[in-house]
Image (tube, helix red, strand yellow):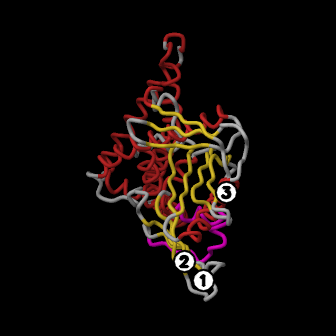
Amino acid sequence: MSESVLDEKLDRVARRHAELAHTLADPAKLGGDYARLAKEYADLTPLVAAIEALKKARAERGDLAALAREADPEMRNLAQAELAALEKRLPELERELRLMLLPKDEADARNAILELRAGTGGEEAALFAAALFRMYQKYAALHGWRFEPMEISETGLGGFKEAIAAVSGKNVFERLKFESGVHRVQRVPETEGSGRIHTSAATVAVLPEAEDVDIHIDDKDLRIDVFRSSGPGGQSVNTTDSAVRITHLPTGLVVQQQDEKSQHKNKAKALKVLRARLYEREREAAAAARALSRKTQVGTGDRSERIRTYNFPQGRVSDHRIGMTLYKIDKVMSGEALDEFIDALIAEDQAARLAEAE
């Protein structure tokens, strides 16, 4: 994007912001449009502030360039030094604006449904799935997010065949969306006597939480079965038919919940997960259509794609999409170093989208 094209876009944004300010000055005339226009105005305000900062820096560049031609050597040297610093800062301001102009993923600000499933590797894969679940739980705590386990299917030996959690807080989906895919582990299982390294895997899916207005589900499209909850090994958890299994007939999607003692609460949780899965199907279809024209992207978001390897003997974690390796596996598993991967993945995605917009 050339500087002239950028400036045209910035002028349009500034004009729209001014129009909205004028329109919002008389809320009584807006009726039901007020909330929508107020949100648009609020979304544009940080962008307009960045535009003003760029304009100010450009004006300052002109003033410093004039001072740099002064006859007074001391004034000239001072202006030249300040001008050199400003010339370095201007591209950063322009890049920040280009990033702000990129189309937003409206799901970024949403809460998320986190799903983990043990893959190849038997009990070791289930133990790894449980370790990943705890990693995300600790990561959520570090960010001040709420992490609510919704359904956990245990193996009886501490592993998880499947685990689902609702994660809520600020920009949860934006931070977690690149975690979807196959996570591979290489380590010596505790049950392995010969000390041989085993490889196993777990699948992670991060779904943006959907609202009723996003996905409408007709009752006639659902088959709801109730049954008695049971824990690891089949022992009875309670003596009422409180567990719920919901089948979405048009798609064949099945969601089961049994963590709550109340059938009503289990049904509500199951519908929440079902709605998120249906919403993600729609997003995936739209993303696939967009991907046909994309030059580059960070991974495919496909749950069958191997995205990361956790090698415990060597103490390293490698993300295969960006070729990044950290030799701090303990800090990654405790959630402390996970942001290093996530920040790099977000930056890579932004760079790819900027290149596509050029």
Instruction: Decide: few, some or many residues near mark 2? Use Cα within 10 Å; few <14, some 14-19, many ≥20.
Output: some
Horizontal side of 113 relative to 95 (left or right) equals right
Which residue is the site of mark 1? 313
As rendered, which of 71 and 198 lies closer to the eye? 198
* Residue at point 51%, 51% (across, down): 206
Magenta-drawn segment: 323-343
For the residue marked with disc 1, what is the amino acid? Pro
Q: Are marks 3 and 2 in contact (CB under 8 Å)?
A: no
Residue 90 picture quarter: bottom left
Q: Which residue is mark 2?
A: 186
Q: CA distance from mark 3 to mark 2?
A: 26 Å
Q: In the rendering, at what x and y percent does residue 348 appear? A: 44, 61
Specify the amino acid type for callout 3: Pro
- Determine contact: label 2, label 1, CB under 8 Å: yes
Q: Is residue 8 left or right of residue 230?
A: left
The disc at residue 232 is: 3
- How far apart are the two marked residues, 2 and 1, measured between alpha carbons? 8 Å
- Image position, residue 260 (x, y; %): 69, 40
What residue is drawn where x is 65% and y is 31%? 264
| Comparing labels 3 and 2, the label whose residue is closer to the camera | 3
* Mark 2 or mark 1, earlier in chain: 2
Task: Decide: is 121 above or below 88.
Answer: below
* Helix, strand or loop at mark 3: helix
Up/down of 316 relative to 196, above or below = above
Q: Looking at the image, tell me whether mark 3 or mark 2 is earlier in sequence order.
A: 2
Going from the N terminus, do you reach mark 3 or mark 1 first? 3
Residue 186 is inside the magenta segment: no
**Distance (Cα) linking label 3 and label 1:** 31 Å
Most extreme residue toward the left is 293
Residue 233: image x %, image y %? 66, 58
